[in-house]
Amino acid sequence: MGFSASTGALLDTFTPSPGGQVRALAITSTKVYAGGAFGTVNGFARNKLAAFNRADGALLNWKPTADDDLVEALATTD
């Protein structure tokens, strides 16, 4: 579940479901990037990295592959 940064209210529209632990987040004005020890998100294959639409939590088509056992840090320039 997500929350509004401006109000602090919980948002039941942002409900990604990773198939494992999320260890890192990076947030831009339009996207939320997640990294961790998961192989799926919302039932779709994602190898330890995933991206979501910040407004509604929709899983994006971004599908890089992480070489290590898990992702523990992410950074963005936005």
Image (tube, grey):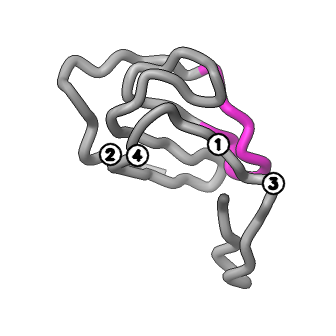
Q: Height in image: 54 above or below 18?
A: below
Amino acid type at image mark 4:
Val
Point out the image quarter for the N terminus. bottom right
User: Quarter of the image holding residue 8?
Assistant: bottom right
Q: What element carries label 2?
A: loop
Name the residue carrying label 4. Answer: 22
Amino acid type at image mark 2:
Leu
How far separated are the C-alphas under marks 4 and 2?
A: 11 Å
Q: Which residue lies furthest to the bottom in this view?
A: 7
On the rendered structure, is 43 left or right of 21?
right
Q: Is mark 3 on a helix, strand or loop?
A: loop
Q: What is the x, y in percent for residue 62?
A: 55, 22
- Quick check: marks 1 and 4 in contact, CB under 8 Å? no
Amino acid type at image mark 3:
Thr
**Mark closer to the chain start, 3 or 2:** 3
**Mark identifier at residue 16:** 1
How far separated are the C-alphas under marks 3 and 2?
A: 24 Å
Q: Height in image: 35 above or below 42?
A: below
How far separated are the C-alphas under marks 3 and 4?
A: 19 Å
How far separated are the C-alphas under marks 2 and 1?
A: 18 Å
Q: How crowded is mark 4: few (under 14 residues within 10 Å), some or many (20 or more)?
A: some
Q: What is the x, y in percent for residue 53?
A: 69, 42
**Mark identifier at residue 74:** 2
Q: Residues within 10 Å of mark 3 (few under 14, many from 20)?
A: few
Residue 32 falls within the magenta-colored stretch:
no
* Magenta extent: 52-61
* Magenta-colored segment: predominant secondary structure: loop
Image point (79%, 60%), residue name? 12
